[in-house]
Image: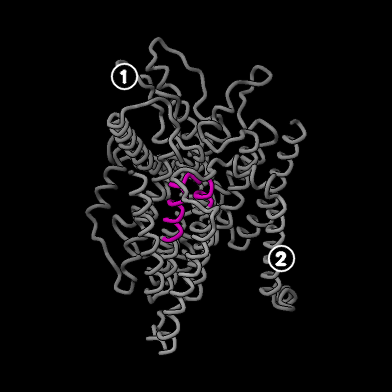
Amino acid sequence: MKPRKTNALPIVTFIIVAVIKIALALFVLLTAVAYTVWLERKVVGHMQNRWGPTRVGPFGLLQPAADGVKFLFKEDLTPPHVYRPLFIAAPMIAVIFAITSIAVIPFGNSLHVVGFNYPIPMQITDVNIGLLVVLGITSMGVYGVALSGWSSNSKYSLLGGLRASAQMISYEIALGLSLVGVLILAGTFSLRGIVEAQAGHFFGIIPNWFIFRGGQFVAFFIYLMAAYAETNRIPFDLPEAETELVAGYHTEYSAMKFAMFFMAEYANMITVACLASLLFLGGWSGPVFGPWELLRDLEPLLWFALRIFVFLFIYIWVRGTLPRFRYDQLMAFGWKFLLPLAIANLVITALIVAWRA
Amino acid sequence: MFHLILFSVFGLICVAGAVNLLLQKHPINSALSLVVVMGSLAVEYLLLGAEFVAAVQVIVYAGAIMVLFVFVIMLLNAGEEEHTEGSRVAWLLGIPGMLAVTVIICWALLLRSDTGTVSLGALPGPPADIAQLLFHQFLLPFEVTSILVLIAIMGAVVLAARPGSEQEAKKEAR
């Protein structure tokens, strides 16, 4: 994971730039998390013929802030029967691993600041195994859910935690395999390299995105399904199925600890959306125009954000539309349908690439 | 220099995690200590320059195998273990025996002339290099290992599937 050397940046400048980038990325991510919650309540509300939040600020836009204050000032109950160290650590583990993966995700090309001689890559750190890092970090996120379920020492939590860990491990395989087809076509693990491999158009009009190439829309479909299961969202939200498990693994949590699980879920959704747009939808590519270089550098951010918004909207749309699966259906779907499909996609893609070479 | 400090720190964390694994009474704490060991090993690989191996270490060991360990501990609801003092034979023979084996292994390793010290960042790191090694130079051992894993999977299926359980399940479904 050596950072790719762009050019020799003095170490102090490098650290200052890195700290600024980390602070900005964290701020944007956490704001995005808060407003995804708002968006979800609003969109699902309109789908169900109600208004959603309207009271706090125009269109209820200040609702996330009000919720945050409420979570901070609520009494933080710790039930007497829990295993304290892990009960406290579990929400932290969940939220830390959910947020960390933003460190390797690129948002755009380099930024050229006037009076600053070095182009600043719009990414906290560029590693040549970026995709593997994201997969590794998300695979560690299971611990937060599993340990919270176990340490709560209650039936609902334990069942929720068990379901979550089984489900996340099962779908991680399909998720990982669905990405291998893209990796074969791109020939690199670097997220920036994968986006660069999707530059240009074919037939002069269709963008050269991996979703349109070599049958990879199958991979995109598998990725979409597995991503819903990985983030425990409807139709695969069995770990927190309220009709059977109250709230699943976070039943015993209150106040900010509960909010941390909530943040972790939405941060994971955003990571998944980032990966989808980087791997299948051409990353930040889009028409770039304008008189100033700074403006032209910043426009790709907008295109990237637009893709993430669309992806999150589909997430919410699905939530407003589909019922929940039964647990055996979920497992059968993952192992007997998605996994063979992912392997078939992998083999066919590999054969096509080998035949062309 | 900075890398050397990091390497030493994570080496210490790794050893501390391993010792903690043995000392903890509750299985889930032991399992989590093992996760710490795996994670710090991954960092050591990373510092040696083997970035692909480090990532695979985290994804496979810390992210999948250890989650299954934790899963099983949760499922069986394993309680606290009792630690015994150990028998006198274990103290008298075990510790000198362990020391002797350690010395012999170290001696045998140092005796080989072709092992030198490896500098930080010297191991083959990029995935492409690993792939070249696996699919060209070490193709046969790689394929044989995969067959070995396949046999292990089949063995697990045979052991897990109780005779006649499928028919009973069908009866219940009716």
Give the quadrant of the C terminus of chain A.
Answer: top right
The residue drawn where x is 65% and y is 40% is: A181
- Letter of the chain that mark 2 sits on in the rendering: B
In the rendered image, residue A235 lying in the magenta stretch gets the answer no
In the image, A88 versus B134, the foreground residue is B134
The residue drawn where x is 42% and y is 68% is: A150
Classed neighbour count for the residue bearing mark 1: other residues with Cα under 10 Å, few (<14), some (14–19), many (≥20): few
Can you tell which mark lies on residue B151? Answer: 2
Please name the amino acid that badge 2 sits on: Ile
Classed neighbour count for the residue bearing mark 2: other residues with Cα under 10 Å, few (<14), some (14–19), many (≥20): few
B108 versus A93 height, above or below:
below
Residue A175, image x, y percentages: 58, 48
Residue A26 in which image quadrant: top left
Contact check, label 1 and label 2, Cβ < 8 Å:
no
- Letter of the chain that mark 1 sits on in the rendering: A
Q: Could you tell me which secondary element the residue under label 1 belongs to?
A: loop
Question: Is residue A232 at least partly visible in the picture?
Answer: no
- Predominant secondary structure in magenta? helix
Residue A214, image x, y percentages: 70, 33
- The residue pinned by badge 1 equals A116
Question: Is residue A206 at least partly visible in the picture?
Answer: yes
Task: Specify the segment rendered in magenta.
Answer: B37-56
Please name the amino acid that badge 1 sits on: Phe
In the image, B143 versus A273, the foreground residue is B143
In the image, B10 versus A21, the foreground residue is B10
Residue A258, image x, y percentages: 34, 57
The residue drawn where x is 55% and y is 29% is: A282
